[in-house]
Image (cartoon, helix red, strand yellow):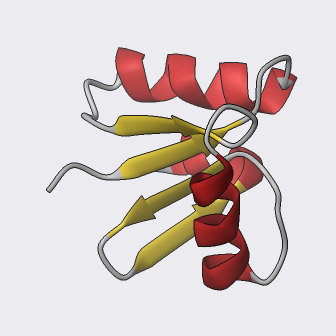
Amino acid sequence: MKPILYTIDGCVECFQVRRHLLTANIEFREKNLLKDRKSATEVFTLVGEVIAPVFVDGEKIVKGLDICHL
């Protein structure tokens, strides 16, 4: 299963992270928290708050610009 990147429209950090993952050829599925309410619940369950960007790859969960260090 592909890793998931949770994003929000208009989020500068989300844009930077998405660009990094694409440049690094890291495959992922993107879920937009504003367009898919279920995704917001998933993020809350994973990290205890609704924030973006969040990258989930199996048991590995990375938040914010730390994703650019993958």
Q: Residue at x 67, y 68 (%)?
A: 41
Residue 50 image-quadrant placement:
bottom right
Residue with the most extreme left position = 1
Q: Position of residue 64 (x, y in %)?
A: 75, 51
Count of picture labels: 0
The part of the image, by quadrant, that contains residue 25 is: top left
- Say whether residue 26 is left or right of residue 55: left
Between residue 26 and residue 41, name the one nearer to us: 41
Left or right of 48: which side holds 1?
left
Q: Residue at coordinates 50% horizontally, 44% vertically from top-left?
A: 5
The residue shown at (84%, 25%) is 11
Drawn side of residue 2 relative to residue 69, left or right: left
Q: Position of residue 62 (x, y in %)?
A: 58, 64
Specify the quadrant that holds the N terminus. bottom left
- Depth check, front residue: 12 or 42: 42
Q: Position of residue 67 (x, y in %)?
A: 58, 49
Q: Is the residue 18 above or below the residue 56 in the image?
A: above
Up-down relation of residue 63 to residue 19 (above or below): below
Residue at 75% x, 35% y is 34
